[in-house]
Amino acid sequence: MKRYLLQRIGFMLITLFIIVTATFFLMQLLPGTPFTNPEKLTDSQLAILNAKYGLDQPVAIQYIQYIGNLVQGDLGYSFQHEGRTVTSMISDRIGPSAFIGLQALVIGAIIGLVLGIVSALKHNSLLDYGSVTLAVLGMSIPSFVFAALLQYYVGVKLEWLPVALWEGYSSTLLPSIALSVTVTATVARFIRSEMLEVIGQDYIITARAKGLKENQVIVKHVIRNALIPVVTMLGPLAVSIMTGTLVIEKIFAVPGLGEQFTLSILVLDYSVIMGITIFYSALFIFVVFVVDIIYSFLDPRINYKGESA
Amino acid sequence: MSETILTVDNLHVAFKTQTGKLTAVRGVSFDLKKGETLAIVGESGSGKSVTAKSIMQLLPAATTEVTKGDIVYNGKSLLKMSKRQVTDLRGSEISMVFQDPMTSLNPTMKVGKQIMEGVQRHEQLTKAQARNRALEMLKLVGIPQAENRLDNYPHQFSGGMRQRVVIALALACNPKVLIADEPTTALDVTIQAQILDLMKDLQKKTETAIILITHDLGVVANMADRVAVMYGGKIVEQGTLDEIFYNPQHPYTLGLLQSMPKLNEDRSQPLLPIAGSPPNLATLGEGCAFAARCPHTMAVCHTYTPRDTVTETGHSVACWLQDDRVAGSRDLVETGSPS
Amino acid sequence: MTKNIPHFPPHQDLQAQNQYAYDEIPSDLFVKAPLDQRKSEEIGTPSVSFWKEAFQRLIKNKGAMISLVMLVLLIALALIGPSLNEFSYREQNLAHSNMPPKVEGLEWLGFNGQNSAGVDQYAERDVQINYWFGTDEFGRDLWTRVWKGTQISLFIALVAAFLDLVIGVIYGGISSFYGGRIDNVMQRIIEILMGIPNLIVIILFILVLEPGITSIILAMVITGWVGMARVVRGQVLQLKGQEFVLASRTLGASNPRLISKHLLPNVMGPIIVTVMFTIPTAIFFEAFLSFIGLGLQAPLASLGVLIEDGYKSMRYFPYKLIFPALVISIIMISFNLLGDGLRDALDPKMRK
């Protein structure tokens, strides 16, 4: 197990290093200069700015400096916001994103699990078809389309919830709901097919043959076994929530990391784009890693000692 | 003669398929007496597993249906019982061992827990008592270091050991009837013998009646008191082990015996396969199901279903060759092979 | 030999089982009449080829069939829709800006030419011509723009899916067919690519390449092929170990023959299904990029651009959002349902 963990962590670091390197050199290819209205600046002013951000150095030196700073958790300064470090921008912005993201995950997981389980237990019933249809709709309709419609009907027309902005708990609801749709649909589809798979297994017949009551069989054997692989969905779900926050924070004017990212893209704030890219990638790699570890605890058949089950 | 504990009477079981009903079991009747072993023999698709599962009522209700007949346990019809009553019997009075030990245990639950679960469902025991029972059972089925093994997961056991766990699980509540559905098919030959010996041993201790479902005549010879031969969803011949092995009356039974290698006989003797393939249940109508493959087929076999002919000893055969009107020789072996 | 004593088992329901009296069976039937041995060997049902069977299963799937019809309809509209009226997708007419949708005969469905305040803009501004989906702020006809946008979105998605397919099949095929060290290295590369959220890669590449149809396609393909490569590799590896491939190899089949006769037909199913799911993903990404401002530049329109435009003026002109939103949703749903249907049809074991 220890060896496996070290191996995994090593591989994670290599992946991250490749991402950082690729991002850095991609940024070098970007058109234009990182400063607003460079045409208004005199050459000497530009030179001062370049020197300040270290842009007068050769690319290789810049790269080594960047990596060196990164190891110390320093992602550099924003080009657009005087004197703000990228790290502080990320830490200021991560709160709202994490909040609506986790809230969406919880909402989506609960509704998705209920829909999927009921759907599998009432296989081929009207209820099943209903929730399968809902899941297909949830998977298919792009989150920003759903968010826009939600904002229009619930926010503008019905005025039930705040249309946008970040003022109090109620303003977290619409973005969370909009984000949770994909989660709900993914979880519902996944758990449904897992349940149907487990229900067909021989050991379920064994459980019935022991004389267990049907609800015992369902809870202790079917649902338990079907739930374990759901953990593996956390990786893809994290990505889908991350993706979702980019647009949904824009729609609902949530002061989160996603909104910062899209803003920085539009104004070409290189260091911020890079910083957030690296942050997102690290987060994703970390989530996948944690999921693997959790999974190995939940499923006794998996061990990382090198012997196969 | 000892007391009958389970009676299956003219059982018909149908599957609902997209193209209509498919009757897989078409009139199976047999009695099971206390402490005896009844082997049900037949090729794949003959309806033996379906018969077994319908006794336990483990067939999915959505796709299967008992269309006719009855199953009587201890004088009470299982089919007329409430769901609750049936689950009360399952595992405590009648239990089952399945074919594949690799898939018949829950992979994410410790084996001790899996045995305890059934025990606690049927008997008023504390957790510690149930755990003790599970331990006893593991010892009984011959699992070494049973104390340590209780907290192991199924994948930590070998196939043979797993089947022992399955048997321990099935016998944990001292059932009166044990249905073993091909209990050794998925195991290595050496392990097979161990498991069969174990079952025989345990049967002596617990006086459990066993219904042994198999297609392996070697297993039958080793285990059974009585044998029922199934073909096309029906029992075509039923009798004691000796009657079936030394005096088979149905051409199918004879075919089965002739296609089995025997150690004590001339090895140069070729095995005789049964020509043709198993019947298509969907198109099976009146007449004998075996008629298409039978070397003794008569005109009557194609249109009329043979009835059971039963001797005083209870040896019953469903074959027109038993009828008085048969013209010419009715000796099975004459047209078969010299034996 | 046992004597034949007529004896009926006590619990046998004879009446039900045999409708005829045994004694009435004519005795001349008791003569040998063996069946033709060949007939007993006959297989009951005619064998149906895999593809034909899969096709039959697909046809029975209502959702997939409705989706197929919807897709054919939408593709047809995307192709001919823009030329069904006299407007072009780029032609501006500021006098006719923000006209609500109006269709003769469909007034009851909301195509009544009234704006959100309930004023008939056509009467008010004396516009004689009907804009079926209304117009945008520059007076461009939205019907034409929606179908032109659908055309572009579908084009981007199809080309991206095709490139994914080509690269994925080649990469996955080489990786799995040669195995060993080549496979190992190729798999490590895939693992690293899988470790990066692909949206981030797409965004970075668009930034570098500058928005446009080609750059969107390229950016999506850079990471998109990984999924296909994994599917192909997994399938081929699984098949390679199977007996029929081994048997064919033993019989001396050449590599090309092995690939074309055994591997390809068996890998086809999962490939088709993967493509079916790649297309909606590509459509989603294109719309997503447009929505965050990295999409096509005006006057070109894709569904994403139209949704973004519509979203900006949603409060006062909701119709600008609703039509492209509806079209993209229907396309996504249809592709997903058709993909589900194909997966079920091609792999009956997977059927849920």
Image (spheres, coloured by chain):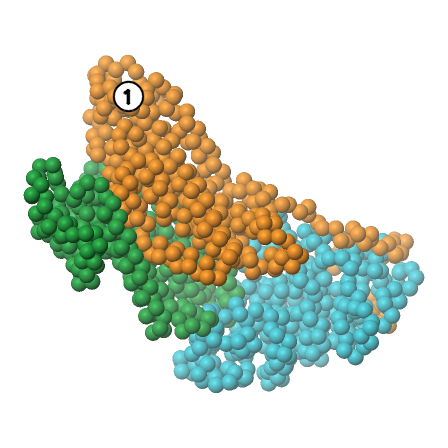
Chain colours: A green, B cyan, C orange
Residue drawn at 19 percent across, 56 percent down: A61
Residue drawn at 35 percent across, 42 percent down: C218
Corner quadrant of residue A300: bottom left
Q: Position of residue A211 (x, y in %)?
A: 50, 70
| Near-viewer residue (A258 or B13) | A258
Relative to A70, C73 lies left or right: right
Relative to A290, B203 lies left or right: right
Relative to B43, A170 lies left or right: left
Could you say whether the residue bearing mark 1 is in a helix, strand or loop?
loop
Residue drawn at 78 percent across, 51 percent down: C39
* Residue tagged 1: C91
In what quadrant of the picture does the N terminus of chain C appear?
Answer: bottom right
Does residue B85 show up?
Answer: no
Residue C157 lies, with reference to residue C189, above or below; the image says above
How many marks the image carries: the answer is: 1
Q: Position of residue C189 (x, y in %)?
A: 38, 56
Q: Position of residue B53 (x, y in %)?
A: 59, 65
Does residue B248 show up?
Answer: yes
Label 1: chain?
C
Q: Amino acid at mark 1?
A: Glu
Residue drawn at 42 percent across, 56 percent down: C186
Query: For the residue carrying disc 1, how many other residues have a C-alpha within 10 Å: few (<14), some (14-19), or many (20+)?
Result: few
